[in-house]
Structure formats: structure tokens, C-alpha cells
Amino acid sequence: MIVHVQKNIPAASLELLGRKLQAAVLTTPERHILITPSSYRSVNGEAAGVEQYIEETFVFADDRQMAALEYTKTKRTVNIGNVAVGGQTDHCIMIAGPCSIESEEQIDQVAQFLVERGIKTLRAGCYKPRTSPYSFQGLGLEGLKMLARVRERYGFSIITEARDATHIDEIIEYADVIQVGAKAMYDQGILRRCGTSNKPVLIKRGFGSTLQEFVQAAEFVLSAGNDQVMLCERGIRTFETKTRFTLDLCGVAWLKAHTNLPLILDPSHAMGYRYGVPDLAKACVAMGVDGLLIETHPNPDVAKSDASQQLNFAQFGAMHDSLRALAQAVGKTMV
Ligand code: PEP
Ligand code: MN
């Protein structure tokens, strides 16, 4: 249950009410927002004596609460630099870049290519959550500093991944959006720290996670006070082994209908092989999603991570041209 409480409630009464309702208390410029476990169906006797301060209560069937479309009625907007994503905008944001930042030269080549295409949001991993400890683990802080220099040179917004909560302060300093990876989606240290930051957060769906668990990961960030949250579907594991994962477009349809968060789709990690990425990207844009995340590399065959799925520049360019036209057909603009 979410309870909206007027700002003029005495502090001690607010504190007591929050304790009785086992609620997280968020204070916004307009009101206090109490978020209780969803098993609460009303404030009943808990609000005795302070009923006059209660503006509205919202009851939910489960712990999809702050992220529920039933709560806000309209979609939330997240601002990445000066690009608005989600909400009532007609934007489909293109988030593009290599899987990993590998060198100053590599990221500069990618940046030049993307800036010529009018793309404003660059992604690259510095802390890579690799399945093997013997694979390339990323350039870490050195990579973040390279990304910050690229941001300075070209004016991009930068998105990069936190592999654990200790990376978040650095990411806040050098980048614009915190990515929470599929393997980190359950990491409450990361989620809670994201909740107390004022940077936008992109949460990728764990490949073995239900939609409910995915949305609840977002609830950790939202209920801690950061409303700048985007969800990213990047493929789930099924019985199928011919593709790396399976892009869950049914899940996207459900998220669109039941949550208020911007939806970003990542066909690169879902497919795992570059030949399938452009067609999948078209399907995503046709669904009217709020953005895409696509991996591209100057020479994918020698990439230090995710070599098989990254598009070279010619492939990316051809895909991007076709997506622009397709976006227009569904009332969207690629930004
Ligand atoms: C990535 O974006 O490069 C990445 C590691 O993705 P995921 O967390 O979805 O596997
Ligand atoms: Mn990758």
C-alpha cells in the first residue's frame, strides 16, 4: 500500500505512522509517501488521530507498487542529459557503444562514428561481470576516466555498469547513467546505493528472473528515493541453445501494460550473434519501446568481450537507417 501524507503532519506523528505500517518513508516537495508491504489493505486504526493528514491510499495486489501503472496512471519520464525517455515523449533513445572500453583509440573511433549519426548516449563497460575470472575484466577506473574524456570531447551522456556497490561513487563522478547488469539485478547493495543517488539507473533483467522479480528490483531503487529508473529486457534463458538468450517480447508487452517505467530493449545480448541483431531491433522499435541498447565495435572480431554479437560500423549504420524510418511509422523519433 502507498499512503500519501500531507507535508504539515507533525514529524513525530509521521515517524509513528511509518513505524506502525512498517513503511519506507519518502519525502518529496509535494508530500510524504509511505510505502508499506502490499499485504496492508488500509491504514485502519494505525492512522487514529492523524487521519486528517492522509491524502490518498493506493492498494496493490503484490509488491509491484511504485512501479505500477495503476499508481501513477501515466508513465514516468527519465532524463538522460537533455533527452527525455519514457513518459509522454515520442523518443526512442539509441544507447550504443562497445561491450567494453578497451583503449582510448577504440572508444574515440566509436564516439566519432556515433556522433556523426546524431547519437547522444554512449555505453561502454569498465567493470565487466564476466562468467570466467580468466576473461578480460575491464579497464576499471582507467576506463571510466577515458569515458569522461570522451564525454567532454563529444558531449555524450555516458552509461556504464556497476559490478558492485563500491563502484557507484566513481560512476557517479565520471558517468551519467548507472547500469545494473543482469547478473547484478539481485544485488541489494547496488540497488540500495542507486536509490540514494540522483543519477538515472538502467536495470537489466536477470536472465533467470521473472517479471515480478525484475520489477521488484526497480522497487528497491524507487522506494529509496530515486525515481529515475529504466528497465532493460536483454533476453532470458530458455531451453533453446541456438541463440544466446531469448528476447522476451511477451514480457515487454506485460511491462508496458503494467509498469510506469521506461522500457529499453537490448537485442545484442539476447541474440548473442550479430546477424540477428538488426531484425530484432526492428521488432523492438515496432513495439514502440522507449529505447534500444546496441553493441558496436570498430572491429568486432577482435573485441575483448561479446565479440560475436557486436555490429561493425557498416552494419550498425544500415540498421540505424532502417530503424529511423520504422520509428517514424510508429510515431517515434530515434534520438
Ligand atoms: C553488457 O551490457 O555488456 C552486459 C554485460 O549485459 P548483461 O548484464 O545484460 O549481461
Ligand atoms: Mn556486452
Image (cartoon, rainbow, N blue to C red):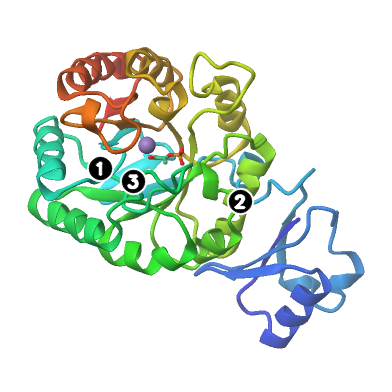
Are there few (<14), some (14-19), or many (20+) residues within 10 Å of tag 1?
many
Secondary structure under tag 1 reads strand
Figure disc tally: 3
Locate the N terminus and report the quarter of the image it occupies.
bottom right
Q: Position of residue 75 (x, y in %)?
A: 51, 40
Are there few (<14), some (14-19), or many (20+) residues within 10 Å of tag 3?
some
| Mark 3 or mark 2, earlier in chain | 3
Q: Which residue in the structure is indicated by mark 1?
A: 121
Q: Is residue 68 visible?
A: no
Looking at the rendered structure, the kind of residue marked 3 is Phe
Q: Nearer the viewer, residue 66 or 106?
A: 106
| Mark 1 or mark 3, earlier in chain | 1
Looking at the rendered structure, the kind of residue marked 2 is Tyr
Q: Dividing the image into four equal quarters, which quarter contains ligand 2?
A: top left
Identify which residue is drawn at 17% across, 28% down.
Answer: 299
Q: Is residue 51 above or below residue 107?
A: below
Quadrant housing residue 327: top left
Q: Position of residue 94 (x, y in %)?
A: 29, 33
Secondary structure under tag 2 reads loop
Q: Nearer the viewer, mark 2 or mark 1?
A: 2
Marks 1/3 in contact by CB < 8 Å: the verdict is no
Q: Which residue in the structure is indicated by mark 2?
A: 186
Identify which residue is drawn at 24% across, 49% down.
Answer: 157
Q: Position of residue 85 (x, y in %)?
A: 37, 41
- Judge left or right: residue 50 versus residue 160: right
Are there few (<14), some (14-19), or many (20+) residues within 10 Å of tag 2?
some
Identify which residue is drawn at 26% across, 51% down.
Answer: 81
Q: Which residue in the structure is indicated by mark 3?
A: 136
